[in-house]
Image (cartoon, rainbow, N blue to C red):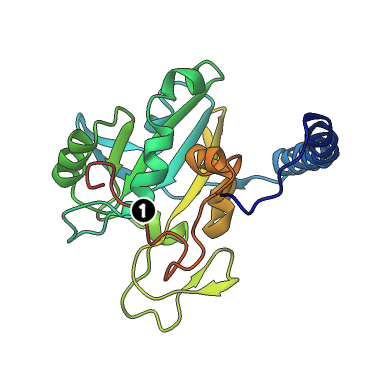
Amino acid sequence: MTDHRIVSHDEWMKASQGLLAKEKEFTRLREEMAQERRALPWERVEKEYVFEAPEGRVTLADLFQGRSQLIVQHFMFGPDWNEGCPGCSYWADNFNGIEAHLAARDTAFAAVSRGPLDKLLAYKERMGWTFRWVSSRGSDFNFDYGVSFRPDTPQPAYNFDTATVKGEEMPGVTAFRSEDGVVYRTYSTYARGLDLLNGAYHLLDITSKGRDEAGLPFSMAWVRRHDQY
């Protein structure tokens, strides 16, 4: 027998209408935040980053594939790893299959990792993903965008210098813009900022149990690669 409060239909409607008012206010605030995000100043990309792709060496500009916008998932897959990070894989499952929708809004998508290309592609095939994935091995890209850290860095700073981390790899997402042959960084997000980009989490949020992570050693302790549940 449930110990949750059970009410009549009329009472349920009244409670839902009260929540709806808060949800509408949250939506309004979220739209305001999105506008502020779009209004951020841009940072010109000064370096000529080169990546390893299935077709050979490509530049950051090449990843746009003729579009004006590019979204990059900074996917944790270190140079000596044999598998991708389970958490990044969970996020990547949410990104798979969206390429056509993004392209319809003049936007390309790619994952970037420091792992060797052959390992990235083997893992991509195992996971059944279709999005573009390239290796930044040998370049400063991951270090410059605050998601990889050299072993000799005493206190690696992460998330706009608001936190220090242990380890050499962390997650993130960056948006770029291309205009007149020049590439700019327009936005980056890390840590809890990535939560907004995980549709599976937000589906769980509308259920009665929610994410059901209370009591775990850490919030994502339950997450597995989708072929390991």
Does residue 1 show up? yes
Q: Residues within 10 Å of mark 1 (few under 14, many from 20)?
A: few
Q: Position of residue 125 (x, y in %)?
A: 18, 33
In this rendering, the answer to whether 40 lies above or below 98 is: below
Q: Quadrant of residue 127?
A: top left
The foreground one among 131 and 9 is 9
Above or below residue 121? Residue 137 is below
Q: Is residue 96 above or below residue 106?
A: below
* Residue 202 in which image quadrant: top right
Q: How many marks?
A: 1
In-image side of 206 versus 154 (left or right): right
Image coords of residue 186 (percent x, y):
61, 43
Looking at the rendered structure, the secondary structure element under dot 1 is loop
Instruction: Give 91 or 222, whichever is nearer the viewer.
Output: 222
Q: Residue furthest front?
A: 1
Viewer-closest of 16 and 198:
16
Lateral position of residue 73 relative to residue 208, left or right: left
- How far across and how far down the image is residue 2, in percent? 59, 50
Q: Is residue 53 above or below residue 225?
A: above
Can you name the residue that lies furthest to the bottom here?
154
Q: Amino acid at mark 1?
A: Val
In the rendered structure, the answer to whether residue 132 lies left or right of residue 27 reads left
Which sits in the foreground, 80 or 207?
207
Residue 216 picture location, percent across and down: 44, 67
Is residue 185 at least partly visible in the picture?
A: no
Q: Can you identify the residue that label 1 sits on?
A: 223
Residue at left offset 45%, top offset 59%? 144
